[in-house]
Image (cartoon, helix red, strand yellow):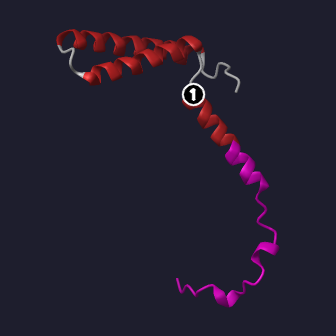
Amino acid sequence: MSIKPNIGILNALIRITAGLTILTWCTAKLVKRPWRQSYILLAVCGAMKVAEGIVRYCPMTDMFENWQENQKQSQSNYTPDSRDSMEGLTDDVVPYNPT
């Protein structure tokens, strides 16, 4: 697994800004209500966005790009012209559609 930058500079700056905003909001809320664990979870998510912006690597973007590449490869391997996969099927098996 090679980790290389997969997001642009502008996207990284937006992630850093949004992450720091979320992190600041969560820490301000945690000062008033330290028993709320939802703020801790949001603080971790904000810190993750800051880290993604600094490193310029997003695992979700990487996973989506790999999925798209696999879809393109599977579609290129599909050959609809092969009659071997349709052996035994005749026209009378398909139901009649009057529309």
Q: Residue at x 69, y 44 (%)?
A: 70
Direction from residue 90 to residue 54 in the image, left or right: left
Direction from residue 89 to residue 56 in the image, left or right: left
**Number of dots carrying numbers:** 1
In-front residue for pair 94/41: 41
Q: Quadrant of residue 97?
A: bottom right
Q: Is residue 59 magenta?
A: no
In-front residue for pair 36/55: 36
Magenta range is 70-99
Image spot of residue 38 (x, y percent): 28, 24
Vertical placement of 80 versus 91: above or below? above
Numbered disc 1: secondary structure: helix
Residue sitting farthest toward the bottom: 92
Q: Residue at x 46, y 18 (%)?
A: 49
**Residue denoted by label 1:** 59
Image spot of residue 82 (x, y percent): 82, 69
Q: Quadrant of residue 28?
A: top left
Q: Residue at x 65, y 87 (%)?
A: 93
Q: Quadrant of residue 35?
A: top left
Image spot of residue 5 (x, y percent): 65, 18
